[in-house]
Amino acid sequence: MPQIAAGDPGRKDMTMSRARIRWAAVLAGTAVLAQAAPARAQAPVEPTGAYLLMVAPEEGPVTAKTLWCGPDGGTLQAASRACAQLAAADGEVARIPAKEGPCTLEYAPVRVSADGKWRGRPRHFTRTYPNRCAAIRDTGGILFGK
């Protein structure tokens, strides 16, 4: 093996090469440590309540909306207000007080249903009303509204 003197340009190349190797080793070690301790992912939050709300008129199309409570959301526009009503009724639609107000005497039967869970317990509600107005009024004015 040839001897390289301290001031020889070949020695500088070899020293630079070792520095690069050390730097690469430091970067590789950092990458390994970063993968060994990944950031902790947040566990998914199970909602307090989750419902499928359906309105089925005797004549006409069936409509369906979703509702989640805690955090509030879904396709029902008034989700926060509906969730407040359900919270006061422990998730039981039948326990939500009726909204005061008149409805016409029009006979156009509509069947409404709310199927889901509240605090992990199953909740089911199905009832037929003489018209959509009566269904909305008698279930608190929000859940089955347009």
Image (cartoon, helix red, strand yellow):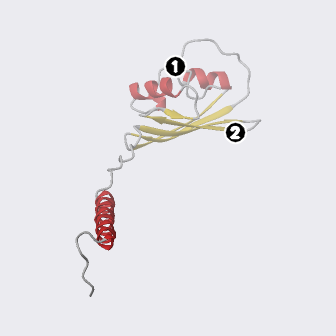
User: Which of the 4 image quadrants contains residue 5?
Assistant: bottom left
Farthest top residue in view: 101
Q: Which mark is residue 62?
A: 2
Q: Which one is in front, 46 or 133? A: 46
**Mark in the foreground, 2 or 1:** 2
Q: Nearer the viewer, residue 4 or 78?
A: 4
Q: CA distance from mark 2 to mark 1?
A: 23 Å
Is 24 positioned to the left or the right of 61 in the image? left
Q: Amino acid at mark 1?
A: Ala
Of residue 136 and residue 120, the one placed in the foreground of this image is 120
Task: Indicate the position of residue 9 as horizontal and vertical percent values.
Answer: 33, 70
Q: Within the image, what quadrant is residue 120 found in?
A: top left
Question: Is residue 83 left or right of 110 when viewed as pictured?
Answer: left
Helix, strand or loop at label 1? It is loop
The image quadrant that residue 3 belongs to is: bottom left
Residue 59 drawn at (x, y percent): 77, 35
- Give the residue displayed 48% in from the left and 30% down from the top: 94
Which residue is rendered at x = 27% and y = 85% of the image? 2
**Which residue is label 1 attached to?**
98
Left or right: residue 38 versus residue 80 is left
First in sequence: mark 2 vs mark 1 = 2
Q: Position of residue 92 (x, y in %)?
A: 44, 33
For the C terminus, which image quadrant? top right
Q: Position of residue 31 (x, y in %)?
A: 33, 60
Task: Quarter of the image for the N terminus: give it.
Answer: bottom left
